[in-house]
Amino acid sequence: MRSPDRVPVVVLGAAGLSAGELLRLLAGHPHLSLAGAVSSSHAGQHIAHVHRHLSGFVRGDFLSPEQGLERLEGLGDAVVFSCHGSRDSAAALREICTRDREKRLRVVDLSGDFRLPAALYQSTYGAQHPAPELVPEFVYGLPELARDDIARARRIANPGCFATAITLALAPVWREDLIQGDVCVSAITGSSGSGAKPSEGTHHPLRHGNLWAYRPLVHQHQPEIERALGKLREGPLAMAFVPHSGPFVRGIHATVQFRLRTPMSENALTAKLAAFYAEAPFTRVAAGCPRLSDVVGSNLCVLGCATHGERAVIFSVIDNLVKGAAGQALQNANLALDLDETAGLDHAPMGVN
């Protein structure tokens, strides 16, 4: 286990919600230090003017993209987190990775740009990939399933929030081929999953006291889930996934239903989940049905289950801004740097919020 001097970090797209969460976590990290926060729309402004909750904890001004490149060239070994949206992230990272010929930088991308092969990206996101030549360099970074690959990686694609919650629910039963027939998933996410800019999906008067489905059966995270599970066991995954927008800010609650090949008690299924994640510090198995308040503010995924004969349901809850984005990105960086996986992330959930 490495115990280095503090490793410098540059955050791209640093004015967004996931970036703000990442900056918060970095402020308490024992081995990483912020060397630059890049934002083209807020360059020159103080970071705490945008992320007001970080006043007194994070100092300095946002850098322009040009200043960010200059800063990186002067750092040598460093970590780059890209919090840009899809396509913008690939464009920014293409320039950085092209300059980084010796691959001294470790790059963690929080967008969807490097999670899928270029051809599948086009069919999923409806556009040609902005930097297809870079895709093979990226490892899909779900630590519970790819810890060794991440530890050797220089380029890491951070999983999507829904993909994280659902894949972690399904992985134990998929690997053991316990599922008979289709899998039906209903998952509700908070408004922070739609980003910082106000829209119909995030505007609080529209969201409060309301609930609706969106992108049913065609959500962009479904191919991620299928590919991640395919590395555990070959075979087609017949999954119907319906995401929902919920009347809260943070968190994802996923309900995953399927038939078991052989009837199993709730205790037996709980034991299988717990055994699968026995060495995973952030994935825990609870008795009964987990709640969002069990995870919000933390990097935890908490699973629970219920069975009735051949019918089974697995519940999965995460904080979409932490385990679904910034916290998992930091977890991936820790592994790639040979640091303690939990460094800067060993925080209890907020509880009622």
Image (cartoon, rainbow, N blue to C red):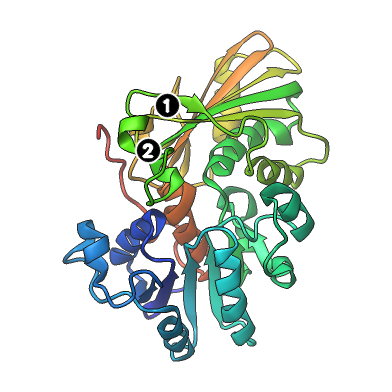
Q: Is residue 119 left or right of residue 292?
A: right
- The answer to which of 200 and 279 lies nearer the viewer is 200
Sequence-earlier tag: 2 or 1: 1
Relative horizontal placement of residue 132, taking residue 80 as reference (left or right): right
Q: Which residue is mark 1?
A: 290
Q: Is residue 1 visible?
A: no
Left or right, 129 with respect to 339, comes to right
In terms of image quadrants, where is residue 232?
Answer: top right
Task: Identify residue type, mark 1.
Answer: Pro
What residue appears at the point 29 percent right and 65 percent down from the top-left corner? Answer: 27
Q: Which mark is residue 295?
A: 2
Which of the 4 image quadrants contains residue 114? bottom right
Answer few, some or many: residues within 10 Å of disc 2's Cα (few below 14, many 20 plus, some between 14 and 19).
Answer: many
For image coordinates 37% across by 51% down, the residue present is 196
Kindly state the secondary structure of the residue where label 1 is placed. Answer: loop
Q: Quadrant of the C terminus?
A: top left
- The residue sitting at 54% across, 79% down in the picture is 105
Q: Which residue ends up furthest to the right in the rendered image? A: 235
Q: Residues within 10 Å of mark 1 (few under 14, many from 20)?
A: many
Write the residue at 16% across / 66% down. 56
Looking at the picture, tell me which residue is in the foreground, 193 or 285.
193
Farthest left residue in view: 56
For the residue pair 153 and 82, the one nearer the viewer reads as: 82
Discs 2, 1 touching: Cβ within 8 Å: yes
Q: Position of residue 254 (x, y in %)?
A: 52, 29
Q: Position of residue 328 (x, y in %)?
A: 48, 54
Vertical arrangement, residue 31 with respect to residue 145, above or below: below
**What amino acid does circle 2 point to?**
Val
